[in-house]
Image (cartoon, rainbow, N blue to C red):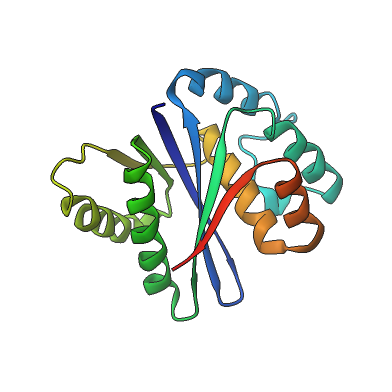
Amino acid sequence: MTSHAFIDESVRGPNYCLCATLVPVHGLAAARSHMRSLLISGQRRLHFVAESPRRRKALLQDIAKTPSQSMIHIAVGGEQVAARAAALESLMFELVNRNVERIVLDSRQGQDHRDRAVIARTLGSDAGTDVQYQHLSSASEPLLWIPDAVAWSWGRGGQWRSLIEALGLLKDVQHT
């Protein structure tokens, strides 16, 4: 099954977590529509850090209704630029192995060029790879809201981590 991957990060202490959410191509339009339906009046995007605990729980239950699966790659320690590069490289190999055809990363404005260099270097090592990738703002791509929610919940730990696991939102966690 062909899918697209949507990537966002969460940083908690020494853990730099990159979360990729895979959505089947045939379910992209419905998943985007569903995610937009979760906005409340005045919201342009969902950002988990800005939501109340009660709303977070409801959102996770609604997100679990989308046809998606998420994975997290974690780099521990070191400075953030190097940690992100390590987690991103590891994640790229995973996504290529899963035959993802398009990767969308949440734009971090002046730092996207670093991601592009890591991706080009990583994907360039596999001549048979035709993966497309781009950076978009989370306001313009609602499917970026899913890895934001999953990464935040995993990083927060406790009941939040248990909830995403119970809802089946997180399929895999790897340390790089």
| Residue 25 picture quarter | top left
Question: Left or right: 126 with respect to 82?
Answer: left
Quadrant, the N terminus = top left
Question: Left or right: 29 with respect to 166?
Answer: left
- Looking at this view, is 24 or 106 the one in front? 24
Q: Which residue is drawn at 34% across and 44% down?
A: 97
Q: In this view, does 140 lie above or below 48?
A: above
Q: Is residue 11 above or below residue 4?
A: below
Q: Which residue is drawn at 71% across and 29% down?
A: 38
Quadrant, the C terminus = bottom left
Q: Give percent across and percent down for residue 71.
A: 53, 50
Instruction: Looking at this view, name the residue that lies furthest to the bottom.
Output: 78
- Looking at this view, is 58 or 122 the one in front? 122
Q: Residue at x 42, y 71 (%)?
A: 83
Question: Left or right: 130 with respect to 137?
Answer: left
| Residue 125 picture quarter | bottom left
Q: Give percent across and percent down for residue 98.
A: 38, 40
Instruction: Looking at this view, name the residue that lies furthest to the right.
Output: 54
Q: Give percent across and percent down for residue 9.
A: 52, 57
Q: Give percent across and percent down for residue 111.
A: 36, 60
Q: How many marks do you count on the picture? A: 0
Q: Residue at x 63, y 49 (%)?
A: 150
Q: Is residue 95 above or below residue 22?
A: below
